[in-house]
């Protein structure tokens, strides 16, 4: 079964750090670009970051640039998001999502999400 | 990069059709044929319903269709069913510097 499972969320104080992980299974992880998308409570979806299959191309939303770092380990079938200097407005459910094989920028597989709460 | 504009809500009776708009600019929706639509039920992850403006992934009913004219994309749900009640989000490729932008979301209610 094709699956993405996020972990690493939790409660962190403003200015703190957190590392999210996304474990992939059921497909050839190393062949796909991957993304992080977040959703603040009661709000819409916001694209956060993307990384190409070989990590050659990495992009960030302006809202997280300089604070978040996306990475992947194809040998471990895993995607990561290192989040530093966290702010209250980073509070959200964070999803990892696979870019579909048939179209760039279309996310065909999503994880269940992991909640990040930034609060003192 | 500003979010694409969607109406906050839309509704229809079972069996009717509902169309949701997604308005961007020539830098995103109007500039590329990489518009996608997602369905999200409460507490669940989004599900891809349409990609490349009008293509349906395997398993998505043909009641869901997409189109685009200029800077505005549209999702039409025909033959509304109770399970179609959900939030719907559009997204568009927006260039290499800021690759993806989502819409503001539309809550579809089946009356």
Image (tube, coloured by chain):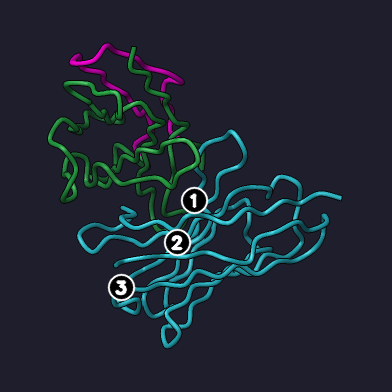
Q: Name the residue under label 3.
A: A26
Q: Does the magenta stretch include residue B82?
A: no
Residue B44 left/right relative to A84:
left
Q: Which residue is the site of mark 2?
A: A35
Q: What element carries label 3?
A: loop
Residue A35, quarter of the rendered image: bottom left
Q: Position of residue A22 (x, y in %)?
A: 50, 69
Does B6 appear in magenta? yes
**On the image, which quarter does residue A102 sit in?**
bottom left
Q: Residue furthest right?
A: A120
- Quarter of the image for the C terminus of chain B: give it: top left
Measuring from the top left, give residue B49's x and y in whole percent: 26, 42
| Side (left or right) of A117 relative to A41 | right
The chain identifier of the residue carrying mark 1 reads: A
Few, some or many C-alpha atoms within 10 Å of disc 3 (few <14, some 14-19, many ≥20)?
few
Residue in view at x 87 percent, y 50 percent = A120
Q: Residue furthest left?
A: B62
Residue A47, labelled with which disc? 1
Label whose residue precedes the other's in the sequence (3 or 2)? 3
User: Which residue corresponds to the image point at 35% horizontal and 76% vertical from the top-left?
Assistant: A29
Residue at the image point whose x is 24% and y is 46% from the top: B51
Is label 3 or label 2 in front?
A: 3
């Amino acid at each position: 079964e094709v699956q993405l499972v996020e972990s690493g969320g939790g409660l962190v104080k403003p200015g703190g750090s957190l590392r999210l992980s996304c474990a992939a299974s059921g497909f050839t992880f190393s062949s796909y670009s991957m993304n992080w998308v977040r959703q603040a409570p009661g709000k819409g979806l916001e694209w956060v970051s993307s990384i190409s299959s070989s990590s050659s191309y990495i992009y960030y939303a302006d809202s997280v640039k300089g604070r978040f770092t996306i990475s992947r380990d194809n040998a471990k079938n895993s995607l990561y998001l290192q989040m530093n200097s966290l702010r209250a407005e980073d509070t959200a459910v964070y999803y990892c999502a696979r870019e579909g094989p048939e179209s760039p920028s279309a996310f065909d597989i999503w994880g269940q999400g992991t909640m990040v709460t930034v609060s003192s | 990069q500003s979010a694409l504009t969607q109406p906050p809500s839309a509704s229809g009776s079972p069996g009717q059709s509902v169309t949701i708009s997604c308005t961007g600019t020539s830098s995103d929706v109007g500039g590329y044929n990489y518009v996608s639509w997602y369905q999200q039920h409460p507490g669940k992850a989004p599900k891809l319903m349409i990609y490349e403006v009008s293509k349906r992934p395997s398993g998505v009913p043909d009641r869901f269709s997409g189109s685009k004219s200029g800077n505005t994309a549209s999702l039409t749900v025909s033959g509304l069913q109770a399970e179609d009640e959900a939030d719907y989000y559009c997204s568009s490729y927006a260039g290499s510097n800021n690759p993806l932008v989502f819409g503001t979301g539309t809550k579809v209610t089946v009356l």
